[in-house]
Amino acid sequence: MTASIVDTLRVLRINGDASHYIEDSIVKESPLTIIFNGEELVTLLCSPQHLDYLAIGYLVSEGLLKQKGDIKRLLTDDRRGVVRVDTAGGSQGETAKLTFKRLITSGCGWGSSVYSMGEVPISRITSSVSIAPSQVLTLMKNFQQRCTTFKITGGVHAAALCDKNEILAFHEDIGRHNAIDKVLGQCFLEDITTAEPLLLTSGRVSSEVVLKTTRRGISILISKSAPTDLAVKLAQDLGITLVGFVRGQRMNVYANEWRVNTNERPGD
Amino acid sequence: MTASIVDTLRVLRINGDASHYIEDSIVKESPLTIIFNGEELVTLLCSPQHLDYLAIGYLVSEGLLKQKGDIKRLLTDDRRGVVRVDTAGGSQGETAKLTFKRLITSGCGWGSSVYSMGEVPISRITSSVSIAPSQVLTLMKNFQQRCTTFKITGGVHAAALCDKNEILAFHEDIGRHNAIDKVLGQCFLEDITTAEPLLLTSGRVSSEVVLKTTRRGISILISKSAPTDLAVKLAQDLGITLVGFVRGQRMNVYANEWRVNTNERPGD
């Protein structure tokens, strides 16, 4: 599907005391309904492009899809905004028990609440990959150069899967979670992989973003924006290196900073 | 509840070739589970403050709560992040049929898909309120001055209910929907009302934000950021005046611009 995610629109532009109509760019928004093993799982509001990647990425992120070989059927209806995914062994009625459940325990906050996503436990990341700060800055610069829809409209987030040197998959979407899921879905469907995967995002890093990253075995998460305290605690616990506020020559490392080699130079 | 929504954290700050540990501010993130008439409705990830406002605002925005008098019981457990809301006449088993349903029809996009929220139809806004551009700019300036958590952390969105001259309710939250729902929930619970209500938001305006605004009978929606095309179409159809990209002396009016009086001067 090659539909654009941007449209144009007649807008009244007011500037001080002057006002006139202009043609302006605007991001499109469209619903995507994911039907999983015959049951309506969720409707997401998204940029109407690469609906198959988004559906698969969502299922992968939620722990509902583990291996590409499990996909028995993948039908995308771009016009109606529907993707149907059937899995080997999947049957109606199983979806409900697999969906995200928060177990309320006696404590408060992280450490006493238990997150479980489906039946798949989340394993701690132990990868020994490392990266130099200059590589982080170069990746973020290349990433921002590709954020063309953001430059035109200001209305989207972006995400990318990279290795230390280049971007391997890149998507923009009106939702920051959707952009990440499109990247993860494309990599899953098209076997885009690397021994040292990094995830880049333009958006704020909440706990859900760290969980998505961990589930795909990605050890380094890099954001242009701020993380939350729960995202930092999860990243610490799950072995994720979390880098935020990558702007100009600066960045903050919030968790597992041993992977950011402040002595290493690119090419080492 | 007066808990702070900001914490401090030890962070490795890298700046060019230099690196050192600093104490930095970070926004808190915490789950809120809403139990509605005895059933677990949803778990939101939010800033841990004013959970009662958020729960009530969420129910109001989803069309599950219509009048303050319908609330039979409101119990907030800040420590566990749980709010229980029971309504007059509400009983177990009713929640499922009330939740958001997207009906898939034969077309694509807005106009052929039908959104229904619960059993409450959304009425077109016909209010004849108007506002001068200079008033929009002054409100946005005051609004941004109150965004103190954003200034410290860069990690939250803000929303406010205003009349033409001042801010009546203001909240910041890690979620842009949550910030709006906290504002709407406070106004609902504390009878904060005005004949000419405006909603201000720091965040992007998607279709859901327009639906929330319409449901509360608010005729003017003002954002610092970009709207989507679906938000604009909904605003046009539902009679909402949608103003975006309010920055410096400039703004764009995307729908029902007749309410923005480009000839009017403040005080008229």
Image (cartoon, coloured by chain):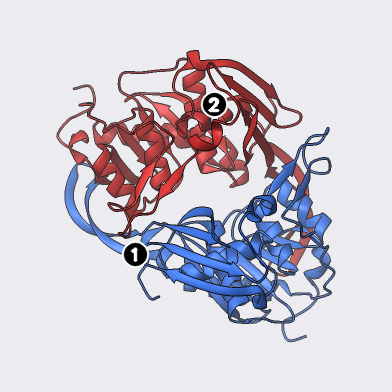
Chain colours: A red, B blue
In-front residue for pair A174/B57: B57
Q: Amino acid at mark 1?
A: Val
The secondary element bearing badge 2 is classed as: helix
Q: Amino acid at mark 2?
A: Ile
Chain assignment, label 1: B
In-front residue for pair B228/A142: B228
Q: Where does label 1 land, which residue?
A: B6
Chain assignment, label 2: A
Q: Residue at x 79, y 72 (%)?
A: B261
Quadrant location, the N terminus of chain B? bottom left
The answer to whether one can see residue B248 in this image is no
Rendering coords of residue B177 (x, y %): 56, 58
In-front residue for pair B239/B19: B239
Quadrant location, the C terminus of chain B? bottom right
Q: Is residue A162 above or below residue A222?
A: above
Q: Are marks 1 and 2 in contact (CB under 8 Å)?
A: no
Q: Residue at x 60, y 21 (%)?
A: A86
- Mark 2 is surrounded, within 10 Å at the Cα level, by few (under 14), some (14 to 19) or many (20 or more) other residues, namely many
Rendering coords of residue A239 (x, y %): 25, 37
Rendering coords of residue B17 (x, y %): 20, 41
The secondary element bearing badge 1 is classed as: strand
- Left or right of A92? Residue A14 is right
Q: Quadrant of residue A266?
A: top left
Q: Which mark is residue B104?
A: none
Q: Is residue B191 above or below residue A133?
A: below
Q: Which mark is residue A56?
A: 2
- Left or right of A126? Residue B2 is right
